[in-house]
Image (cartoon, rainbow, N blue to C red):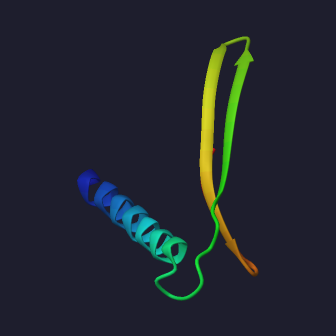
Amino acid sequence: MEGVGVMRILTAALLMLAGVTLAGCGADGEPIQPTMSANIGVGTSGAYVGGGVGLQRGPLSVFLGR
C-alpha cells in the first residue's frame, strides 16, 4: 500500500507543475515571469547546493525547491 501514497504525491506534484507551466506560458492570460534562486554553501558536514523556481501573481505565490 505504500506505492499508492507515493503515486498520489507524484500525481499532485505533476498537476501542480502543469498548472505552473500553463500560468508561466500565458495560456490563461498574460505570461508571468518566474523567479529563480540558487544557493551554494559549505558547512561542517560538507558542501551543499540548492535552488528553486517560483511564480507570484497577486496574493498567490508558488515556489518549488529549497
Instruction: Please state the total of marks drawn on the protein image.
Output: 0
Left or right: 4 as drawn, with respect to 30? left
Q: Position of residue 11 (x, y in %)?
A: 33, 65
Tell me what residue is drawn at x 41 percent, y 70 percent.
18
Q: Is residue 30 above or below residue 54?
A: below
Q: Is residue 30 above or below residue 4?
A: below
Left or right: 28 as drawn, with respect to 48? left
Q: Nearer the viewer, residue 14 or 1?
A: 14
Q: Nearer the viewer, residue 38 or 45?
A: 38
Q: Nearer the viewer, residue 21 or 50?
A: 21
Left or right: 38 as drawn, with respect to 18? right
Q: Is residue 64 above or below residue 32?
A: above
Locate the C terminus and report the quarter of the image it occupies. Answer: top right
Q: Position of residue 20 (x, y in %)?
A: 51, 70
Q: Position of residue 59 (x, y in %)?
A: 76, 80
Tell me what residue is drawn at x 58 percent, y 77 percent.
31
Q: Nearer the viewer, residue 47 or 10?
A: 47
Q: Position of residue 21 (x, y in %)?
A: 46, 69
Q: Is residue 14 visible?
A: yes
Tell me what residue is drawn at x 50 percent, y 88 percent.
28
Q: Is residue 61 visible?
A: no
Locate the N terminus and report the quarter of the image it occupies. Answer: bottom left
Residue that protrudes farthest toward the bottom in the picture = 29
Residue 12's image quarter? bottom left
